[in-house]
Image: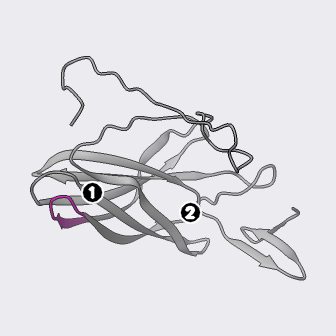
Amino acid sequence: PYIKTGAKNQLAIRLDNPANSSRWYPGGGIYRNVWLVKTPPVHVAHWGTYLTTPEIKPSAATVSLKVAIDNDSAKSATVRVSTRIFLLDANGNKTGASVAQIGPANVTIEAGKSAVTEGRTTIANPKLWGPIPRQKPNRYVAVTSIQKNDVLADTYETPFGIRTLRFDADEGFFINRERVKL
C-alpha cells in the first residue's frame, strides 16, 4: 500500500544491532545479498518449487515437481501451470529444445490463498551431475510458466542436477555409483 506506481519511491532499511546481544552473531547488519522481487498478483510462491529425482537409471530419470502458487489478488483465479525442462551448458544457459515437459494442469486458487500442483515426467538418457575431475557437473533447469486467461502471468526457473547418492558403512560414500573420498 505504500508504493506509488509511476512515482519515485524510496526503500529504507533500519538495522538494530544491540550492544549486549546474547548471540555471537546477532544478524543486525546486512551481511548478505538483498533482493526486491516484483511479482504479478498470481505467481509462483517465493521458493515455490520442490523438485526431486526419485528414480534414476542410465536410460531414464523420473522428475517429480511440486509448484506452490500464490494468489495475492482480490478475486479467485484459474491458471494453467506447465513446466519445460532444459539442459544447461557450462555457463548456465539453456541448450536446445526442452528434454521433457510436465503438465499443463489447470489450478483454481481462491483470493489471498495458495495452491499446490504436482506433476511427474521422465528425462531419457539423463546427463548426471557429479564432482569434477572424474565426473561432469551437468545441470538442468525446470522453467515453470503460469498462464491466466491465455496470457503469460509468471515464469519461475528451478536449476537442478540429477545424481545418485549412497552411503555405505563399509565402502564409504558414492555419487553416481562411483566412490568419492570425503
Magenta segment, prevailing SS (helix, strand or loop): strand
Residue at the spot 29% in from the left edge and 59% down from the top edge: 69
Image position of 14 with respect to 20: above or below: above
Q: Identify the residue shown where x is 39% and y is 67%.
A: 66
Amino acid type of the residue that numbered disc 1 sits on in the rendered structure:
Asp
Identify the mark at residue 126; answer none if there is no mark.
Answer: 2
- If the image is split into quadrants, where does the N terminus sit? top left
Nearer-the-camera pick, 145 or 20: 20
Q: Of helix, strand and loop, which one carries label 1? A: strand
Q: Is residue 87 left or right of residue 21?
A: left
Quick one: SS at disc 2?
A: loop
- Residue 180's tag is none
Q: Which residues are magenta?
A: 104-113
Q: Work out whether mark 1 precedes mark 2 in sequence or the reverse, and give the earlier one.
A: 1
Where 30 sits versus 159, above or below? above
Residue 141 drawn at (x, y percent):
47, 51
Q: Which residue is mark 1?
A: 70
Q: Indicate yes or no whether the magenta region holds residue 110.
A: yes
